[in-house]
Image: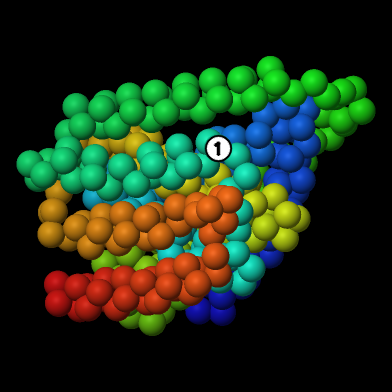
Amino acid sequence: MTESILYLLAGVVLAWFGGEFFVRGGIGLAAWARWPTAVIGVTVAAFGTSSPELMVAIDAAFAGVPQISLGDVLGSNVVNVSLVLAVVVALSGMKAEDGGVRRDWFISLLVPGLVYVLLMDGWFSRQDAAIMMACFFAWMMVVVRHARAHAATRAISVEKIPVIRMLGFSLLGLGMLIGAAQFVVHGGKGVATALGWSPFIVGAVVVALATSTPELATTLIARMRGHHDVGLGNILGSNIFNVLLVAAVAAMIHPYAVNLREILPSLLFGAVTTLLIIPGRGGHIPRWRGMLLLVLYAAYMALTLNQGAAD
């Protein structure tokens, strides 16, 4: 138990410093490439902070239990919005400064519906996975095109930007975030086992929370530094990565049967919470939405714990 708690603490500290380095390097690289900071958040940051979910997915698929991956990514998506982003918004509000944020918000809103349509036959097939991956890469092409169009309109000097140092910061931060997630997942599982929690509760609560630690650190630090779009882009991009790529990878390796009744609460909460973070007038997301999201997260946890007890 003590060892597991130490793992958790080490993971939190590592995530904080990793987020600091990653945000600093990512902002520098965005300036050098003349890309909107939101693009760095929705691509590089999102991929980095979603790496724990990807590792869980691959391990679970090869272990013959790919269902863990779907539960993890759907649960993590709810945590990302209704806890991680909600905490930041409730503290000070946020503002979407790049038009691409609305596009990525719309894609995030469509994801739960796409999952339901593809899996309503009760089977997550390789064909379903291929459709998800195709949607993911199509979205990525649109994001890159947006970034290139933005760069073409910006005429700034990049000679004074220490690009090598910024790249080093980004890679160091990314490595620390990935390492932090592994510490937190390991420690969280140990604590849950010591408390006698069921495998369902461990997966739905501990793993989903643990794999969202990098998103929390990155989003908080980005907001503290005034880079709202990095934090928003990170959350939206992570949610898109998690389902359209991570869950699809697990199903591509090992197709499996799906219990729609089991995943429906996560899909519904995922859609409702995403609706609440649409940027309002001037791109602003007010504090009251963050508070409402925290209430919804508490309801989601209560429903999940109750469902786990019933099963």
Q: Nearer the viewer, residue 288 or 212?
A: 288
Q: Residue furthest front?
A: 281
Q: Nearer the viewer, residue 50 or 250?
A: 50
Residue 166 vs 14, above or below: the answer is above
Location of residue 310 (image quadrant): bottom left
Query: Left of 240 or right of it: where is 22?
Result: right
Q: Residue placed at 67% from the left, 29% from the top?
A: 35
Q: Nearer the viewer, residue 259 or 282?
A: 282
Q: Residue placed at 61% from the left, 72% from the top?
A: 91
Q: Residue furthest right?
A: 160
Applied colour scheme: rainbow
Query: Left of 15 or right of it: where is 70?
Result: left
Q: Residue placed at 82% from the left, 29% from the top?
A: 163
Q: Residue furthest top?
A: 152
**x and y, in percent, of residue 181 in the image:** 54, 55
Q: Which residue is mark 1?
A: 99
Location of residue 309 (image quadrant): bottom left
**x and y, in percent, of residue 63 in the image:** 29, 45
Q: Residue placed at 87% from the left, 23% from the top?
A: 157
In this rendering, does residue 213 appear at all?
no
**x and y, in percent, of residue 74 in the image:** 33, 54
In this rendering, does residue 157 appear at all?
yes
**x and y, in percent, of residue 230 in the image:** 63, 46
Q: Residue furthest left?
A: 121
Residue 116 vs 181, above or below: the answer is above
Q: Tell me the amino acid under the disc marked 1.
A: Gly
